[in-house]
Image (tube, rainbow, N blue to C red):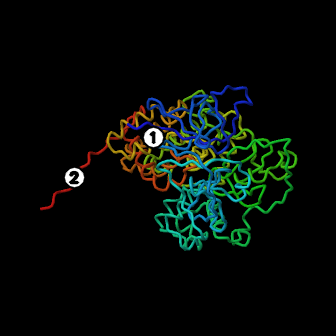
Amino acid sequence: MDELFAIYEAVYPYFPQDHSHDDSHMTIRKGDRIKVSIPNSKFDLSEQDWLNGSNLASGSRGFFPASYVKYIETQGNQQARPPRPHRWVESYVSRPVLCHHCGDYIWSLRDKIKECEGCGKCYHNICFSLIGNSQCTTYDGLTKPEVYLHPVSVENWTVKNVIEWMAALNLYRYIETFREANICGEQLREMDEEKLREMGIKDEFHQKSILVCIDELCGQNTESQPYAARLPPVISIDMEASGCSEHRFAEYNFSSMQRCHLCDKFLYGLVHQGLQCRECGLCCHRFCSTSQPTECNVPKLERIRRPSFSHNSVFGQDLPDEVNKSQKDAPDVLHVFVQEIEQWCQEHSTEALSVYRISCKAEEINQVKKIFCQEGDTSKVNLSSFSVHCVAGALKKYLRELPNPVLPVEMYNMFIHTAKSKSSTLKSLSDLIEELPPAHKSTLQFLMAHFCRLWKIQNESGVSDGLDKLSHVFCHILLRPPWERIIEIVDNTKLHIDIFEELMRNGNWGEDIPPIPTSVPPTLPP
């Protein structure tokens, strides 16, 4: 078997001399890629404080802090070529590419970008002016982005172009809806609220999120659109640059349409739309956070920040932290949701597998979220006034908003590779489950046991139903690629479904499941 390597990208710079560390440690700069050998086929390196690897940008080797980097991908033994200067050209994109400075996707069809012809690194023009010196390093198997010398018209987009763009804007919840409706670029430009409703997208927040993204892509003025009256108004504020008080930015999930406080355009997508300062509440695009530095000013932001701004939200928190707080196998909030849902399903057994399929208005789900944010003691939360579909929607929202999903992004490649290799799939998936970090493993066990109980309730009702009622809902919720490779979700959706259903049918979740009918071959022709 070829030796495997984990590829990391530096999120923060690290200079050993600043910490009096010896020469066994190496310098890393933001954006550097570091190659780390995975010993003894043990993939999970996340619990280590220090990693030892090779800096592909500088050619140096040594120790560096694991908390200063983010995982990108796992690779086979590929030979890196010696570093050399970048060869910068100006290009246009038709497929979203990641900016290696701000970490946001570049998806405008009208704006030029900077791209290295050698290694394929891409930058927004503004971000390019902010980067320091780095070296161009390539290796066998390097995939370069699709770029063009001239702008590409959205009318020429294929269906795949459309859904890849949706993935980069965190609209991937609806990529199958758009794929099945065969929406190409020409139809995308003509999209409106009525057409979205006809496609089954009825939630107003979701409609506006999609249409605002389309407006920005096509260069259309959102403020002049028929739905503009129901959008948050423009708010101009003077955000001064200052080095005395830095923001504490964290990725955030916004439950309603929000404007970036720095550029006043809307934040894009349905989840993980942008950043929010934990101190002052400033909201912004990832791109704006690096290109428009500002002071952290609590009094100034207090009058314009979201009414729902909270320091105590249980949504959007790291799963291990929430499991530790609960001292149970899963976060308290999941226990509350599951209890409500299963109690309802016992009384409505013929609908048990469909409970997660029926949507609820985003405003109602936000009310459930608000209750958990306001109530310090989760055990005192009373959800009796909400419909079961609202509670089910809140459970899905909680899982979608996890910074790292139940099946963590660090292991995404391994789950996909296992699903692709059909031989011994169960054994391999079972092995991967055993390698999950403890909090992720126990939460998965809790959720899968819940799904098995719903399956059993449905079966005992005498009304049979398929696992697709669950797998098509949770395939993107429990498992998603790292942000840097989120577009892979377009080609891997079927594998996500296969993984979920295989785990349901053959996983060991401590619950009895209905008998699985033996497949019978079709009748032979005469």
Q: Secondary structure at mark 2?
A: loop
- Confirm or deny contact between disc 1 and disc 2 (CB under 8 A): no
Q: Position of residue 464 (x, y in %)?
A: 36, 50
Q: Is residue 307 left or right of residue 393?
A: right
Q: Amino acid at mark 1?
A: Asn
Q: Is residue 402 visible?
A: no
User: Image quadrant for the C terminus?
Assistant: bottom left
Q: Amino acid at mark 2?
A: Pro
Residue closest to the eye, 422 or 515: 422
Q: Which residue is mark 1?
A: 77
Residue appearing at x 51%, y 59% in the figure = 175
Question: Which numbered marker is on residue 42?
Answer: none
Tell me if mark 2 has few (under 14), some (14-19) or many (20+) residues whose alpha carbon lies within 10 angstroms of its own: few
User: Image quadrant for the N terminus?
Assistant: top left
Q: Is residue 294 left or right of residue 204?
A: right
Tell me if mark 1 has few (under 14), some (14-19) or many (20+) residues whose alpha carbon lies within 10 angstroms of its own: few
- Does 502 appear above or below 94? above
Q: Position of residue 249 (x, y in %)?
A: 73, 44
Q: CA distance from mark 1 to mark 2?
A: 43 Å
Residue closest to the eye, 315 or 494: 494
Q: Position of residue 69 (x, y in %)?
A: 62, 38
Q: Earlier in the sequence, mark 1 or mark 2?
A: 1
Q: Is residue 462 left or right of residue 386?
A: left
Q: Which residue is mark 2?
A: 521
Residue appearing at x 41%, y 40% in the figure = 503
Q: Secondary structure at mark 1?
A: loop
Residue closest to the eye, 514 or 138: 138
Q: Specify the quadrant of the image occupied by residue 18.
A: top right
How many marks are shown on the rendered structure? 2
Residue positioned most to the left: 526
Give the foreground label among 1 and 2: 1
Q: Position of residue 345 (x, y in %)?
A: 48, 44
